[in-house]
Image: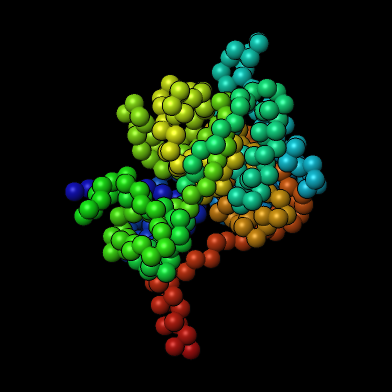
């Protein structure tokens, strides 16, 4: 057997399993093969991305010198960003018949992202791009660890359990709703995920991002993180995307796809990136978030903030997530002293 481990230790850390990729390199003696040449960006943009790996403050200063940092007070920043996004995705050529550039807005927090997303959709509605909205089931992952899923006290009435693997008495894809007094199959915790049901409103013309993998009703493969555009709806209320593929109306694993967090954006590449980094998101802003956000684009990346100086300080923080190995090492050092 041959096992490939692919990643970048400068990006976000894995939330629930420590940092195995980094530990293998630092403590297990594994020497990685490195792809050091960046092909996604060029010129001054490429130099800024390289700086962002270890010197994010200097990278931001370079972006400022390039005119790619827009300092706009909170009240008007979302509108400015939304207008720039709509301009960024305009097709090339006369009469808008050429290739349409791809663009993505990245925000450190879902709260700031929701404000930007609302401004973008308001702009789309004003242009008459969106049709009549409909309501659909949305399943929000509660991100419970396996240990938490094994604890019956972790569940709330109404939670939806969806099996990701076949299990005794259950098949892959099956959903169960937690009711008061109902026994949860906690012993099978490694084979399902837990979601909170809600409602998502979208229309023909909207952009969606999928939050789980699966198969369409016409047997096409769907991938987690995939972006699609809603072309319309069937008579039964199912969703038809821009390729003509049909997603079931109760799919649930979707979000509006104009804005994402940097964690969700790690595997994506687009032509243009617009990064929302307001003061309300400063606690969530760090070096990894800046590096991932900045490096998603091919052509350019623009940063929108209310305070450029505070942002330069904020991006110099690093994610602090100590693994058990590192904790044991610190304990041993303390005992020696």
Q: Is residue 325 among the parts visible in the rendering?
A: yes
**Residue 87 in picture, x, y percent from top left:** 69, 26
| The furthest residue to the top | 94
Q: In the visual, does 289 lie left or right of 151?
A: right
**Residue 231 in picture, x, y percent from top left:** 51, 23
Callout count: 0
Residue sitting at 56 percent across and 18 percent down? 99
Q: Nearer the viewer, residue 150 or 290?
A: 150
Q: Nearer the viewer, residue 141 or 101?
A: 141
**Residue 10 in picture, x, y percent from top left:** 50, 54
Residue sitting at 53 percent across and 65 percent down? 320
Q: Is residue 300 above or below residue 305?
A: above
Q: Nearer the viewer, residue 146 or 27?
A: 146
Q: Residue 132: name its quadrant.
A: top right
Q: In the visual, does 315 lie left or right of 250?
A: right
Q: Is residue 318 above or below residue 227?
A: below
**Residue 62 in picture, x, y percent from top left:** 69, 44
Q: Residue 153: name its quadrant.
A: bottom left
Q: Nearer the viewer, residue 47 or 299?
A: 299
Residue sitting at 41 percent across and 49 percent down? 7
| The furthest residue to the front | 181
Q: Is residue 123 above or below residue 211?
A: above
Q: In the visual, does 20 lie left or right of 43?
A: left
């Amino acid at each position: 057997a041959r096992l490939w481990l692919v990643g970048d230790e400068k990006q976000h850390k894995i939330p629930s399993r420590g940092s195995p990729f980094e530990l293998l390199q630092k403590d297990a003696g594994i020497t990685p093969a490195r792809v050091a040449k960046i092909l996604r960006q060029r010129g001054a943009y490429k130099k800024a991305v390289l700086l962002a790996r270890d010197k994010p403050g200097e990278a931001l200063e370079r972006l400022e010198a390039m005119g790619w940092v827009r300092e706009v007070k909170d009240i008007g920043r979302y509108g400015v960003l939304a207008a720039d996004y709509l301009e960024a995705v305009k097709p090339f050529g006369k009469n808008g018949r050429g290739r349409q550039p791809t663009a993505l807005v990245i925000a450190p927090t879902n709260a700031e992202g929701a404000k930007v997303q609302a401004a973008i959709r308001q702009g789309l509605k004003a242009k008459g791009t969106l049709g009549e909205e409909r309501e659909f089931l949305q399943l929000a992952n509660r991100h419970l660890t396996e240990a938490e899923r094994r604890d019956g006290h972790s569940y709330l009435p109404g939670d939806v359990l969806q099996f990701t693997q076949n299990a005794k008495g259950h098949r892959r894809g099956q959903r169960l709703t937690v009711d008061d007094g109902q026994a949860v199959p906690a012993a099978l915790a490694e084979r399902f995920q837990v979601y909170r049901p809600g409602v998502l409103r979208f229309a023909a013309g909207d952009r969606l991002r999928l939050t789980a993998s699966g198969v369409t009703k016409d047997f096409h493969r769907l991938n987690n993180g995939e972006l699609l555009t809603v072309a319309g709806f069937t008579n039964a209320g199912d969703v038809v995307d821009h390729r003509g593929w049909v997603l079931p109306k109760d799919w649930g694993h979707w979000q509006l796809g104009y804005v994402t967090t940097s964690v969700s954006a790690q595997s994506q590449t687009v032509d243009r990136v617009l990064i929302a980094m307001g003061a309300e998101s400063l606690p969530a802003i760090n070096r990894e978030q800046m590096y991932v956000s900045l490096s998603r684009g091919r052509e350019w990346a623009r940063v929108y903030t209310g305070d450029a100086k505070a942002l330069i300080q904020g991006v110099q923080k690093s994610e602090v997530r100590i693994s058990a190995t590192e904790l044991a090492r610190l304990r041993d050092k303390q005992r020696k002293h």
